[in-house]
Image (spheres, grey):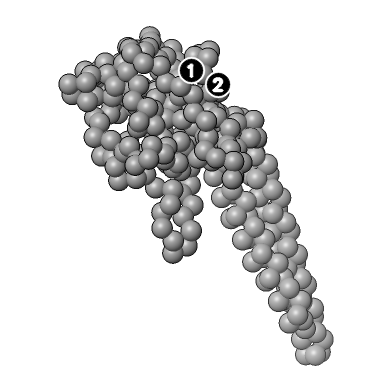
């Protein structure tokens, strides 16, 4: 005679193992997608850095402003429009990125946004961050291009004002330097009245002796690690699938045994 509790345990085990197989295989597929994404980023970095250095001008075609391409621009700094990008860490230390426009053409107000470097955060209550002096006259800046300012998550207080958002107009009264989480070029152009090239120049190389750190974070491109994780998840999924088959095989075997026992009992009863 079948035992109801045994049947329930078997069904529950098959259900849980089946769910485990689906989840584990899905995790493996997700890791493969992450591997492909990181491989594509690595290819883009290598392709950009292999291109000949680009000289940025107001007339540079957007198609030539490839991410990771080495470039240089000559113009005058507009420090009154500087912005500090908050929550940017360097070697585990909290700090800011200093972003300042470089004016390429005064008649058209054409400019390129330059990420000048990193500076440490000032302890609360000890005043404002000390920004480096901005040289006057025509300056030449070298670095790598990116399609946008790398973004951080916006962390607004619930129901409160967007205190980290960009002011509607720059410069701010009193000369304070705004501190923002993210800096979209379109919003920045509207606030400053400038016309920006559709790219961002991260000042690199040795950089000027301005006290800023010109060591920019690089995206993770270790796609082999994701592939390794995918193999592990698929292996776990295979183990769960084998366990599912073992449990199912045991259940079928018990059902057959009970069927054979019932048939023998009915045969003896007819004698």
In front: 16, or 63? 63
What residue is rendered at 44% in x and 42% in y?
A: 180
What residue is rendered at 53% in x and 35% in y?
A: 129
Left of 198 or right of it: where is 99?
right
Which quadrant of the figure has residue 244? bottom right
Q: Is residue 253 above or below residue 22?
A: below
Residue 91 visible, this angle? yes
Q: Check the picture and name the quadrant holding the C terminus.
A: bottom right
In front: 10, or 24? 24
What residue is rendered at 25% in x and 31% in y?
A: 194
* Secondary structure beneath label 1: loop
Query: Residue 47: image x %, image y %?
Result: 43, 18
Q: Residues within 10 Å of mark 1 (few under 14, many from 20)?
A: many
What residue is rendered at 73% in x and 63% in y?
A: 247
Query: Residue 265: image x %, image y %?
Result: 80, 84
Q: Which mark is residue 151?
A: none
Find the residue positioned furthest to the left.
107
Left of 215 or right of it: where is 140?
left
Q: Is residue 262 above or below residue 163?
A: below
Left of 256 or right of it: where is 71?
left
Q: Check the picture and name the quadrant holding the N terminus.
A: bottom right
Residue picked out by circle 1: 204
* Secondary structure beneath label 2: loop
Q: Count of labels shown?
A: 2
Q: Residues within 10 Å of mark 2 (few under 14, many from 20)?
A: few
Residue 42 visible, this angle? no
Residue picked out by circle 2: 211
- Of discs 1 and 2, which sits in the foreground? 2
């Amino acid at each position: 005679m079948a035992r109801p509790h045994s049947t329930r345990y078997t069904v529950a085990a098959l259900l849980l193992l089946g769910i485990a197989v689906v989840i584990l295989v899905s995790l493996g597929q997700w890791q493969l997608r992450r591997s492909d994404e990181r491989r594509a980023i690595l290819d883009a970095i290598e392709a950009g850095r292999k291109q000949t250095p680009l000289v940025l001008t107001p007339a540079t075609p957007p198609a030539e402003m490839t991410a990771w391409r080495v470039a240089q621009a000559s113009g005058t700094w507009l420090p009154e429009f500087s912005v500090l990008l908050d929550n940017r860490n360097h070697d585990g230390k909290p700090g800011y990125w200093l972003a300042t426009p470089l004016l390429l053409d005064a008649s058209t107000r054409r400019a390129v946004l330059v990420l000048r470097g990193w500076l440490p955060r000032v302890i609360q209550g000890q005043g404002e961050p000390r920004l480096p002096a901005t040289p006057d006259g025509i300056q030449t800046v070298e670095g790598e291009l990116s399609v946008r300012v790398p973004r951080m998550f916006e962390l607004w207080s619930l129901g409160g004002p967007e205190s980290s958002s960009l002011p509607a107009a720059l410069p701010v009264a009193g000369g304070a330097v705004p501190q923002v989480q993210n800096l979209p070029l379109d919003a920045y152009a509207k606030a400053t009245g400038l016309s920006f090239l559709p790219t961002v120049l991260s000042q690199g190389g040795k950089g000027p002796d301005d006290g800023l750190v010109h060591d920019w974070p690089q995206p993770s491109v270790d796609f082999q690690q994701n592939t390794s994780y995918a193999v592990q998840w698929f292996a776990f999924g295979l183990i769960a699938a084998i366990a599912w088959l073992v449990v199912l095989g045991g259940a079928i075997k018990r059902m057959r045994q009970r069927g054979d026992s019932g048939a023998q009992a009915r045969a003896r009863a007819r004698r």
